[in-house]
Image (cartoon, rainbow, N blue to C red):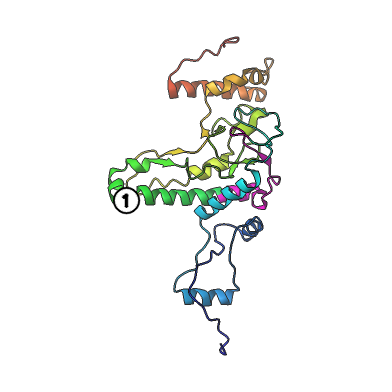
Amino acid sequence: GSSGKVSWAAGPKPVFACEELTESLQEALVEDGLKLASLPPALMLEYEDALGEPRRRLGGLELCQFLREAWQERHGGTKKNEVTGDGAKAESTEEGVTDDEVPEFELGECGLLGLRDRDDIVTMMRFVANALWEEHLTKKGKSWAMKQGWQLHKFDLLDGLDSVPLLLTHANKITIFTPKHTKYNSWRDILPTRANMFVNKDIHKAIVNAVDTTIEGINREVKTEVPGVRAFTLHDLIPHREEFEALIDPKSSFCSPRNEVLRQFWSLVADSVLIDRTPVDVTPGAP
């Protein structure tokens, strides 16, 4: 009008940038196809005034879904890069990705600008995990369930994180969370040449730290289930026994820095016995 003010009409509420992610990261995500609206500061104030409430900002669940779809669009059914079911490098295929093959990429090589930087990936994982925890509380934390408590003690991410490309490995490769391959969240340094078998420590921490154990109804440890991710056990080391034994320096003492993996091994033995109380034959030559 003649006053110079913009006239606002009712319609769909666009999504604007959030405060949890950096401006540069969100710009990269927009380049990848994420739909984010923007307005000059003065117009933003007018918009919120006309809206009568704060603008709608990008949420963790929306980011999660966008990343899932963006990855699927680029890598669903394309030629695979590497299969990591047991951490071993697989042969390339010419026809495309089968059900058991999961592509993994060095940072900057997956075709998504938002997945180039390690710190950005950890930040997005934290953002998404916090949103999934809030959703968990909303679904499980109704009055009856809150009183019962037990429903809150299982943080099930099997659906929420399935096919989401925020799984950064200990070798700094990016891939998706999926039950089609196994990654381990403990004993990351016991097989230095197999770092890709393990989940990056900060990614795992971002998921675990999303759980707020101080809320009403939680009175014991919360079990978190992540698709394809679990603790490393002594039995998981067996397929890599020869490779592991080659890392041990028989000429050095047990306490030598050169035998760090040997000390980790015996700690793993003790840990495994405590967890499952299953005796394991660790003598040379044992199957």
Which image quarter holds the C terminus?
A: top right
Q: Is residue 246 left or right of residue 143?
A: right
Give the magenta range. 98-124
Judge the density around disc 1: few (<14), some (14-19), many (≥20) Cα neighbours within 10 Å. Answer: few
Q: Position of residue 50 (x, y in %)?
A: 48, 77
Which image quarter holds the N terminus?
A: bottom right
Q: Secondary structure at mark 1?
A: loop
Q: Is residue 139 visible?
A: yes
Compared with 213, 48 (above or below) is below
Q: Which amino acid type is shown beneath numbered disc 1? A: Lys
Q: Is residue 247 left or right of residue 3?
A: right
The answer to which of 206 and 116 lies nearer the viewer is 116
Residue located beneath label 1 in the image: 142
> Which image quarter: residue 237?
top right
Q: Position of residue 33 (x, y in %)?
A: 63, 57
Q: Is residue 122 magenta?
A: yes
Residue located at (70% from left, 29% from top): 91
Residue located at (65% from left, 47% from top): 74
